[in-house]
Amino acid sequence: MKILLVEDEPKVAAFLHKGLTEQTHTVDIASDGLLGLRLALVNGYDLVILDNLLPGLSGIEVCRRIRESLSSVPILMLTALGETDDKIRGLDAGADDYLVKPFAFQELLARIRALTRRHQEAPGTAGVVLRLADLTLDPVTKIVQRAGQAIQLTAREFALLEFLLRNKGRVVSRVDILEQVWETSFDTGSNVIDVYINFLRKKIDRDFTPKLIHTLVGMGYTMKEE
């Protein structure tokens, strides 16, 4: 996932950048509101994490201006201001969620996962046919085809392929897959993910070109054309 972090406290920014990149996210940092707004409007981000108290332009104003131009990008606001009125102002400006400092990093990750799910399941996106090269997946009819040939998948294989396609071009870790597809966080030392990836490769890659499922050693998997 490509994330924009707008945070003016260097230690906080460095801590979040380290933690998020370890989760295989790509993170750009802006240390003031004006730069954050400019990056948000120029680059395509999957999520904006936005501090409220920023130099140059307040987080509330940055959020409002982003929302005026980019209606769907998820925005998570971070702030030391925990009063109800402050939260209401952030949400009214267009933020999707609000997290008060100090917070546990695991809670931030949980909020990010929830925002991602809501964004992917938003009206107008859930039923869109997913495509990559000559592979198609219809979330409504549950039909998968490669080069016009029907591919028969189990329910779990279908869920895994749908998740990979919705994140095509991005690296997803085994933990991401476990939490989003299996909806669990059991022992990540298990090889269940590798087994199902191999099942998919046999069905959608083995007899076709180009290969679409790729392994990044020590990082996870991605779907893209070679």
Image: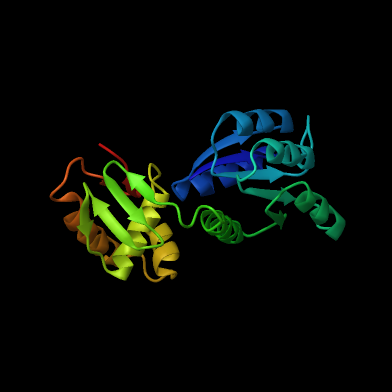
Q: Give residue 168's position: percent from left, percent from top.
A: 38, 45
Q: Give residue 44's position: percent from left, percent from top.
A: 54, 35
Residue displayed at 13% across by 49% down: 207
Quadrant position of residue 177: bottom left
Q: Give residue 85's position: percent from left, percent from top.
A: 86, 56
Q: Residue furthest left?
A: 207
Q: Nearer the viewer, residue 109 or 196?
A: 196
Label total for image: 0
Q: How is the image coloured?
A: rainbow
Residue displayed at 60% across by 61% down: 107
Image side of residue 148 versus residue 189, left or right: left
Residue 68's place in the image compared with 107, above or below, is above
Q: Nearer the viewer, residue 156 or 29?
A: 156
Is residue 192 among what the camera can see? Answer: yes
Image side of residue 156 versus residue 120, left or right: left
Image side of residue 9 versus residue 127, left or right: right
Is residue 216 among what the camera can see? Answer: no
Residue 17's place in the image compared with 82, above or below, is above
Q: Quadrant of the C terminus?
A: top left
Q: Give residue 79's position: percent from left, percent from top.
A: 75, 50
